[in-house]
């Protein structure tokens, strides 16, 4: 077995805001959990990203614990991985400042998510929203991260992190590993149930568009049954059948069967039967996670101990990188 010394580092994070969807689970969380056996993993609840849009403070606090408990309930293991909250390690904000000074206004303005969120939150287009991808780059670069498990929608942000790493390395000297995205071929973009040409998103106002990780069995059945499909009746994965293809992907990931196996299993079947099977497999996947999350949320002392231990470990690694960066850009070391 490989030793820790030659294992690569994985970093990923999720915002503790909105209602997390099946897209977040299948696109990111599920992979974050399975990668733990082969990599040194660092998983962060990115609360500072969340305040780039208006948050009710008590809700943000509650959702931060909810997400931590969800991390643990999906199998992220604090004895194997570093699990922590972003605001507990101030180096994330500090490295952001240095990287800000290497990021061009033009490249930050081109970020699709910034443009979309500026439309969604037209009354609050703040500098933090603009700077969001630079904070994300700092998250990643502080830990010598080699691979970043994310959904397709975060690819452009990861590209910026790569650009900034390369730019810093070229301007000063080799410092950062240039990280690669880890985007699952199947599940990297789970689509909306109401409009399968659009991404399933926690900020979608149509509740029927997404399966939330908190949805109970009845709601899941109802939402899957209503999912938009087509007038054909064959259960086949194809570019011209976006709705059914999305359900096939969801079933494939929830049941552990390949797309080919799913198509074979439902050959000659109809959409009604298939949709029931999709709902059942999602329920079978989510309900044990929901129960475990509920149980963990009752043990605040344990959750706080996980956060403390995670922050201490992350802080040590992050400080080391930040000290190196400060030195290379010419900031003198502090004397206390
Ligand atoms: P966030 O919180 O919006 O989403 C968390 C993760 O879920 C993925 N995702 C999806 N995957 C497949 N299909 C979907 N429909 C879908 N919707 C969301 C996202 O791609 C993401 O991986 N900026 C990040 C959080 C972040 C981060 C980081 C990630 C901050 N720092 C450092 C990695 C590394 C975000 O807002 O994700």
Image (cartoon, helix red, strand yellow):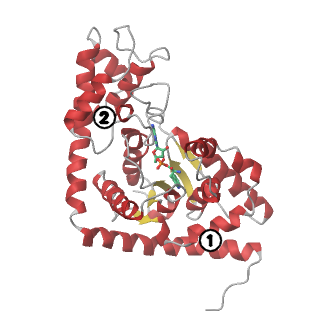
| Residue 257 at x, y percent in the picture | 31, 28
Q: Quadrant of the N terminus?
A: bottom left
- Residue where numbered disc 2 is placed: 254
Q: Position of residue 275 (x, y in %)?
A: 27, 22
Q: Secondary structure at mark 1?
A: helix
Q: Is residue 173 above or below residue 120?
A: below
Mark 2 neighbour class, 10 Å CA radius: few under 14, some 14 to 19, many 20 or more: many
* Left or right, residue 206 beside residue 132: left
- Classify residue 205 as left or right of residue 146: left
Q: Looking at the image, tell me whether mark 2 or mark 1 is earlier in sequence order.
A: 1
Confirm whether residue 304 shows in the render. yes
Q: Is residue 129 left or right of residue 240?
A: right
Q: Is residue 8 visible in the rendered structure shown here?
A: no
Residue at coordinates 35% horizontally, 31% vertically from top-left? Answer: 208
* Residue 197 sits above or below residue 213 on the image: above
Task: Say which of 177 and 288 sits in front.
Answer: 288
Q: Residue at x 35, y 30 (%)?
A: 250
- Residue nearer the viewer, 160 or 15: 15
Rendered-image quadrant of the C terminus: bottom right
Specify the label residue 267 is tagged with.
none
Please identify the residue farthest to the front as the structure is shown.
123
**How far separated are the C-alphas under marks 2 and 1?**
40 Å
- Provide the residue designation for mark 1: 94
- Which picture quadrant has residue 26? top left
Does the residue tagged 1 have its C-beta within 8 Å of any atom of ligand 1?
no
- Mark 2 or 1, closer to the camera: 1
- Image location of residue 88, percent across then percent down: 47, 72
Please, what secondary structure does the residue beneath circle 2 have? helix
Report which quarter residue 116 is drawn in. Answer: top right
């Amino acid at each position: 077995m490989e030793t820790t010394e030659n294992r690569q580092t994985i970093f990923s994070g999720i915002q503790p805001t909105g209602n997390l969807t099946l897209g977040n689970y299948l696109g990111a969380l599920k992979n974050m959990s399975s990668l733990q056996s082969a990599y040194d993993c660092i998983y962060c609840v990115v609360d500072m990203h969340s305040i780039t849009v208006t948050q009710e403070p008590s809700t943000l606090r509650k959702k931060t614990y909810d997400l931590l408990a969800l991390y643990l309930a999906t199998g992220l293991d604090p004895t194997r991985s570093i699990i922590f909250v972003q605001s507990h390690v101030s180096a994330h904000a500090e490295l952001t400042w240095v990287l800000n000074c290497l990021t061009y206004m033009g490249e930050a303005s081109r970020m699709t998510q910034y443009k979309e969120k500026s439309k969604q939150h037209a009354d609050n287009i703040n500098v933090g929203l603009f700077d969001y991808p630079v904070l994300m780059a700092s998250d990643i670069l502080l830990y010598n991260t080699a691979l970043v498990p994310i959904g397709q929608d975060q690819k452009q942000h990861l590209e910026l992190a790569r650009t900034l790493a390369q730019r810093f390395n070229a301007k000063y000297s080799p410092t950062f590993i240039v990280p690669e995205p880890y985007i699952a071929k199947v599940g990297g973009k789970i689509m909306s149930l109401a409009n399968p040409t659009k991404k399933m998103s926690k900020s979608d106002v149509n509740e029927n568009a997404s399966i939330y990780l908190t949805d109970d069995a009845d709601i899941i059945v109802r939402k899957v049954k209503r999912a938009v499909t087509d007038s054909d009746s064959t259960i086949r994965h194809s570019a011209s059948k976006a709705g059914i293809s999305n359900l096939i992907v969801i079933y494939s990931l929830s049941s552990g069967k390949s797309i080919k196996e799913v198509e074979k299993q439902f050959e000659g079947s109809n959409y009604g039967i298939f949709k029931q099977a999709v709902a059942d497999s999602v329920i079978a996947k989510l309900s044990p996670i929901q129960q475990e999350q509920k149980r963990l949320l009752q043990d605040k002392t344990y959750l706080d101990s996980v956060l403390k231990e995670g922050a201490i470990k992350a802080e040590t690694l992050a400080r080391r990188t930040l000290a190196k960066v400060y030195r290379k850009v010419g900031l003198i070391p502090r004397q206390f």
